[in-house]
Image: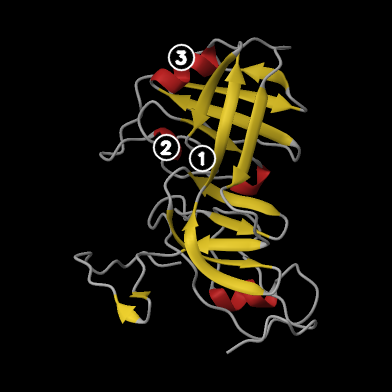
């Protein structure tokens, strides 16, 4: 057990420095950017195996959202000195030309059809073609991206055949859309103002979605899910 009221003990979500840089759990602990000396680590969630290596499910670190999806799933969360298992998402909305659109997530490795995602420098260097690809690895027929700094559009791709390298500077947000989402993003012009609002679904210090809940009220939860090799 861990006493979270102990002032010298803290918990956080860590990765390889960016989401698409795959490193071992041991190296994550050795290179942990947080103060103090790590004493324990555990694989937290699922990742995009054999592709981008990015975590697939919502994770919120002490310094903000690392990955967010709009799908509520069971997560380990910590708020103050209290840990809990609760459903967690991290997403939001973007307002384009006065119309509000739901966001499919933040740094999400697999955007759903017609979705719009927000990507930051945390994503890393892996191609943004991955989030707009289909199950058979083909790309969406309609793709668009726009760069936003301090709420102002600084670059728009228009409709393109591929999203390409991320090239996301710190402080820049990239809107990436596919199908209907691409139509909305492609309608932007340099100088337009957009309102991007993202947040976790709960007020937490950290949280990470794992897999299906295996215990509830002290009883094993029955599940038909098969085993998966892509733990992270």
Q: Where does the image place residue 67, in percent across and percent down from the top left?
A: 55, 50
Report if residue 207 is visible in the image.
yes
Q: Distance of mark 1 from mark 3, alpha carbons?
A: 18 Å
Q: Which mark is residue 105?
A: 1
For this rendering, which residue is in front, 183 or 194?
194
Q: Secondary structure at mark 2?
A: loop
Residue contact between numbered discs 1 and 2, judged by CB atoms under 8 Å:
yes
- For this view, does 145 lie left or right of residue 149? left
Q: Which mark is residue 111?
A: 2
Q: Distance of mark 3 from mark 2, alpha carbons?
A: 15 Å
Which callout, 1 or 3, points at the residue further toward the start of the chain?
1
Few, some or many residues within 10 Å of mark 1 (<14, 14–19, 20+) = many
- At 44% from the left and 65% from the top, the residue drawn is 210
Q: Distance of mark 1 from mark 2, alpha carbons?
A: 8 Å
Quadrant housing residue 215: bottom left
Which callout, 3 or 2, points at the residue further toward the start of the chain?
2
- Pointer 3 residue: 183
Q: Where does the image place residue 164, in percent across and percent down from the top left?
A: 51, 31
- At 78% from the left and 28% from the top, the residue drawn is 150
**View extreme (bottom): residue:** 1
Q: Is residue 149 above or below residue 87?
A: above
């Amino acid at each position: 057990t861990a006493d979270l009221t102990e002032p010298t003990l803290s918990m956080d979500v860590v990765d390889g420095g960016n989401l698409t840089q795959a490193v071992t759990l041991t190296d994550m602990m050795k290179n942990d950017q947080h103060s103090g000396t790590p004493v324990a680590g555990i694989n937290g969630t699922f990742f995009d195996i054999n592709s981008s290596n990015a975590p697939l499910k919502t994770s919120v670190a002490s310094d903000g959202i690392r990955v967010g999806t709009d799908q509520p799933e069971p997560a380990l969360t910590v708020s103050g000195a209290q840990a809990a298992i609760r459903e967690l998402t991290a997403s939001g909305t973007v307002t384009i030309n006065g119309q509000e659109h739901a966001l499919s997530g933040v740094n999400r490795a697999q955007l759903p059809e017609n979705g719009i995602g927000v990507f930051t420098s945390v994503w890393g260097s892996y191609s943004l073609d991955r989030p707009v690809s289909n199950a058979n690895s083909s790309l969406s027929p309609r793709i668009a991206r726009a760069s936003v700094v301090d709420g102002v559009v600084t670059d728009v791709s228009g409709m393109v055949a591929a999203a390409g390298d991320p090239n996301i500077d710190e402080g820049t947000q990239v809107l990436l859309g596919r199908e209907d989402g691409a139509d909305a993003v492609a309608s932007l012009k340099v100088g337009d103002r957009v309102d991007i609002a993202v947040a976790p679904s709960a007020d937490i210090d950290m949280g990470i979605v794992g897999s299906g809940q295996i215990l509830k009220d002290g009883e094993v939860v029955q599940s038909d899910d098969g085993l998966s090799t892509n733990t992270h």
